[in-house]
Image: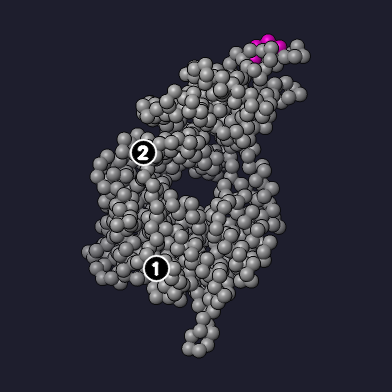
Amino acid sequence: MTLPATPPLALLNREQAILEFNRRVLAQAQRDDVPLLERLRYICIVSSNLDEFFEVRFADMLEAARDPASQVSSRDVERVGRAAHVLIDQQYAIFNEQVMPVLLKEHISILNHADRNEEQRRWVGKFFEREVRPLLMPVGLDPAHPFPQVANKSLHFIARLSGKDAFGRDNRIAIVKVPRVLPRVIKLPEAISGGQQAFVLLTSVIRAHLEELFPGRQVEAFSQFRVTRDSDLEVDEEEIANLRHALRSGLTTRHFGRAVRLEVVNTCPEELSQFLLEQFVLPPAALYRVNGPVNLVRLNELIDQTDAPELRFLPHEPVWPEGRLPRGKSIIDRIKKGDVLLHHPFESFEPVLEFLREAVYDPDVLAIKQTVYRTGSKSELMDLLIEAARRGKEVMVVVELKARFDEEANINWAERLEAVGAQVVYGIVGYKTHAKLLMVMRREMHGGKPVLRRYAHLSTGNYNPKTARLYTDLGYLTADPDITADADTVFRQLASLGKIKAPKRLLLAPFNMHSRMMELLQQVADAARAGYQARVVLKINALTDAELIGGLLAAGQAGARVDLIVRGACMLPPGLPGVSENILVRSVVGRFLEHSRVSYFRWGDGDEQEALYLSSADWMSRNMFRRIEVAWPVLDPKLRQRVIDEALQPYLHDSLDAWQLGPDGHSNRISDSGVSAQQVLMRHFGPD
C-alpha cells in the first residue's frame, strides 16, 4: 500500500499556527516561576517575532490574496488579521497588568511625565535639550512639504497644531521622526531616582517637550506611530549577472516596501489615524491601537540596564565535553577514533571553533570548505576562514546571501573572503543553501604513502557562537569516509553546478530527502499493519508540507504511534477520531529556543529496523524542494541512543514547558508543575 500524496482532511492554517506559537511564547510572561526580567524579555521576543510575521508571512499572504489563482482568500486574511489583533491586545494587557505592577514592587519603574517629580523633570528637560532636540527635525505638511518617506519600523510622532504657521497658512499636520541613533530607554541617575531603578522612555521625553518644537503654536493632538512594511528582498536571480551586487542595491529599497501594518497609541484621535491610513494606503483592519509603547522590542534596553541579577535566569555556562574531547588534545586525532556528538547549548560550541582553529594552523591541512547561513556581523569562525586563506590554504565558502535579514552581514563577509583569495560561491540560483557543513581535507601518511583524508562537522544549527548559547542544536564531528565523501560532493555540486552520484549516507534536498522520508513513513505504516512495533518521533521547528503530513497521517491510521515535537507552526490537526487519533503534537517553550531537528523511525523489533537522522531541514515544502539541505544518519548505536535519551525522551516527558496541540489548532499547556526537559539537560550536563 502506498502512502497518499496529500492528506485527506483540511490542514490547519499556517499563519494562524505561527500566531499560536507566539501565544505560547507570550504565556511565558505570565509564569510566576520565570524570573521577572525574563518575563519581560518574552514580551519583547513576541514583538520581534510579530514584526517579522508582518514583514514576511502576512505580507506574502496579502500578495497571494490578490492573485485570483491563489488558494488564499480575503476571508483567510481577515481571520489571521483578527487573530493578530487579539494576540497583540493580550500582549499589552499582560505587560500592563501582570508584568509592570510586579516590576514596580521590585522598585523598577518606567516614569511617565505625570509621574516625574520636579527634579526628575528638570533632568529630563536638560537631557532633551542636550541629546534629543538637536536631532529632531519637525516637518510641517503642505504641497511643498509632502508626507515624508517613512522607513519600515521607524518611530514617528504625528501632531495636529493650532493656529497658522509662520507664513500665515493653515497647515495643521506635522511629522517628527524619532532618530534611531538615540537610546529608547534612559535610566535616571541614582541620586534622583528615589531609591528605585527609574527609567524614562525616549517617546515620553519627546512627548513632554513636543510643543517646544513648534514655537507659537499649540499641539492639540498627537500620537506615536510606526509602519511595518513588506521586507522580503526579491531579485530575479535568472536575470541578474551578479547576485551580490543586486542584493546590496536592494538593501536600500527594502525599508520602503508596501505597508502592511500601522501601529498607533490607543489615545490617537480618529482624525490622525485615518489620515495615516490614507497616507500608507491601508484598510482599517491594518490599524493596531496599542495600550503602551509602540514597539515593545526596545524594552530589551531596560532589561539590559537593570541591576537585578536575582530577576534573571541563573547564569548558564555550556560545558566542554572533557570526557570525549580532552582539552589541549587534537580534535582531529580524536575524530579519527570515532564520531563525536555535541549537544548545544548544554555543551559548548567552542570545540567546533577549536576544530576549525586546529585546521587553520595545521600545515598538513590543505583545504577547508564551509557553508555560512547566519553567522553574525562579528564572527571568530569567519576570521579563522580569512586567516586560513591568508596562509595559503584552499578555502571555499558557500555564503548564502539571501539569509533573510542577514543579507548585509553575509555580503560583507563574502567581500572580505574574496579580498584574501578565498573561493566564495553563493549557492544555486533559485535555492537557498541552508545546509550546515564544515569540511577539512588533510594530507596524512598511510602505509608510507601520502593520502588525503577528510574530516567534517555537520549541524542542525547555524555556525554562530552567540546563538549556540541560546538555541538547542546538535553538532556532529566525524571522519566517516562515506559521510565526509558525501559532504565533499555537496560542496563540489554547489561550486560546479554539475550532476552528482546519489550520496551514500547523506540525504540531500531538493533531491532525495523528501522521498526518503516518505519511504521511511511507508515502512513504518507497513510494519504497523503487519503487527510489528511501529513508531515515528520527530523533533522539528515546523511541519507544513502536505505530502509529509499525509505520510504521517497514513502511518498513524495504520496503527503506528506518532509523536511530534514541533516548536512552531504545525498544520497537522492531531487527535481527530479515525483520522489522527494516534498522533500527538507537543511544543516545548522554555529558556532556550528549541532548534534541533531529529527524525526517528522504527518498523520492527531489531536494531536494523530503526533509523535516526539529524538534519538542517524542517518538514516544510520550502526546505525539501527550494533549499539545499542535508540530513545524516547516526549509525553508531551508542550515539543514536544518546540522541534519543537527550533530544527526544526528555521532551516527550516534559510536563512543565510543554504544550499539547488540539485538532482545532489551539494548544494548551500540559501542566504548571513537573519536569522541564531543558532543566533536566542543564542538570545532566552541569558541573558535578
Q: Work out whether 20 lies above or below 142.
A: below
Residue 369 percent coordinates (x, y): 56, 67
- In the rendered image, residue 163 lying in the magenta stretch gets the answer yes
Residue 118 percent coordinates (x, y): 52, 16
Q: Secondary structure at mark 1?
A: loop
Instruction: State which region is magenta.
Output: 160-164
**Quarter of the view holding residue 524:** bottom left
Q: Work out whether 209 lies above or below 71.
A: above
Amino acid type, label 1? Pro
Residue 326, labelled with which disc? 1
Residue 521 percent coordinates (x, y): 35, 61
Please report contact status of discs 1 and 2: CB closer than 8 Å, yes or no. Answer: no
Does residue 681 appear in this view?
A: no
Task: Give me the residue at 27% from left, 62% from top.
Answer: 534
What is the residue that sits farthest to the front in this orientation? 191
- Magenta span: helix, strand or loop, mainly? loop
Q: Secondary structure at mark 2?
A: helix
Label 2: few (<14), some or many (≥20) within 10 Å? few
What is the residue that sits farthest to the bottom in this orientation? 448
What is the residue that sits farthest to the left in this orientation? 531
Q: CA distance from mark 1 to mark 2?
A: 34 Å
Amino acid type, label 2? Glu
Q: In the rendered image, which residue does mark 2 sit on?
A: 310
